[in-house]
Each structure stands twice: as C-alpha cells, then as structure tokens.
Image (cartoon, rainbow, N blue to C red):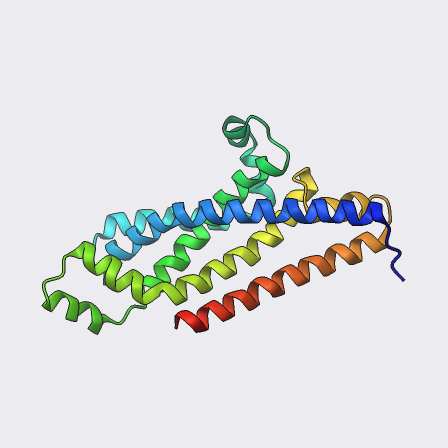
Amino acid sequence: MIAYSSGMTDILMTALKQTVYMVFWSTLFSVIIGFIPGVILTLTAPDGLKPNKAVYETLSFIVNVFRSFPFIILLVILIPFTRMIVGKAIGTTASIVPLTISAIPFIARIFETSLRETNPGVIEAARSFGASDIQILFHVYVKESIPRMLNGVVLLIISLIGYSAMAGTVGGGGIGDIAIRFGYQQYKTDYLVVCSVLLIIFVQLIQMIGNHLYKKLS
C-alpha cells in the first residue's frame, strides 16, 4: 500500500510541473522549427510542387540521421550546445534544448507525410483556378492536412513525455528525476509506482484531447 505524505505530494507536484514545462516548450519549438523542413520536403518531393531531387534527398538524409540517434546519446552530445544556448548543461530549462532537437526531425517527417497525403485532385483543381504555389501550399496542403498534422503533434507530445522522463536521469528534473532519485536510488517503491501512474494518466489525457480535437477538425 502506498503511503502518501504532504512532502511526497509537494515533490511530485513540482516534478509534474517541470515535466509539463519541458514538454510544452519543446513541443512548441519543435513544431515551429520542424514545419519548415516538413514543407521543404513536401515541395521538393518527386510529386511536389517544386520537385528537386538533390534538395529532397539531402534534407531527407539529414532528417533520417538525426532521427537515428538514441535520445540519451543525443542528450550527451548536445551538452556543449545546450550550455551555449542556456548557459548550463543540466536542469529543466537546459533539457528543452535536446528535447527540441530530437523532436524536430520526428515532427518534420510526420508533417511531410501528412502534407503529401493531400488529394492530388484537390491540388489540380486549385491549379486550374489559377492558384499560386504559395496559395496551394497554405490553402490546400496545410488546410487539408490539419487533422493529420494534429495527430502527429499528439504522437510527438507522447514521445516527448517519455524523453523528458529520460532527461530526468541526467539532472533534467521532472517525473523521471523523482523516479530515479527517490524510487530507484533510495528504494522507495511508492515513488516509482506513483510516478508511473502520473505518466500514464498524462499520456492518456493528451491522447483523449487529441482524439477529441481530431474528430472536431475532421
């Protein structure tokens, strides 16, 4: 049976706030930045508005390379860059840097896939009405892809929740940090159980909200 205390509650609430903080900002930054390569990949693809094999294959290779890095390794490799950006290599704010960089190629590929699933007939219809490439991009590609892109963002958030827990193992704070410091290192099983339950609830909540928004937008 798990024994709760006010001290335990305060610790877990602080950790939960840190996790939400890391996930929110890394999601926001990665979606904004990742949209750019996602669009470029879509436009320069063989079936895109501006096919360019060299650009597409080069950018696709770069995205695949960064997606191949295990997060824990990327976390260590980026320590000098993280220190340059935020002035320190550990902590909740510092963890946002590797979280964002790991998420950019992931969401860029999801955006590309979502955009390229746009019905070619709708694109041709827009062309026949004299729409420019920019108009087709934003009023056809993006508009038609919003529900699919939203699903991708939900997947991203869920992945970042897991990554943020991993960041806690190296001083990133959040639920993962509490699970390691109290649950594992101090053999307090109740902390491990509660941290796991909190992460499960967090993920389920995000998925429920995402499903609701998808149905509304669809």
Task: Classify residue 85 as left or right of residue 60.
Answer: right
157 up-or-down from 218: above or below: above
61 up-or-down from 145: above or below: above
197 and 4: which is toward the camera: 4
Q: Residue at x 86, y 50 (%)?
A: 5
Whether residue 50 is visible here, answered yes or no, is: no
Q: Residue at x 77, y 46 (%)?
A: 10
Q: Where does the image place residue 2, in percent across and percent down from the top left? A: 87, 59
Q: Where does the image place residue 105, in percent across and percent down from the top left? A: 43, 50
199 and 12: which is toward the camera: 12
In this figure, what is the number of numbered marks?
0
71 up-or-down from 213: above or below: above
Task: Classify residue 125 as left or right of residue 35.
Answer: left
Whether residue 93 is visible here, answered yes or no, is: yes
Q: Where does the image place residue 156, in percent across and percent down from the top left? A: 51, 56
Among all residues in the image, which is located at the extreme front? 6
97 and 134: which is toward the camera: 134
Q: Residue at x 78, y 43 (%)?
A: 181
Q: Where does the image place residue 83, in percent across and percent down from the top left? A: 55, 28
Task: Name the quadrant of the C terminus.
Answer: bottom left
Q: Residue at x 21, y 52 (%)?
A: 52
Task: Classify residue 82 as left or right of residue 215.
Answer: right
Task: Classify residue 143 as left or right of residue 216.
Answer: left
Task: Name the quadrant of the N terminus.
Answer: bottom right
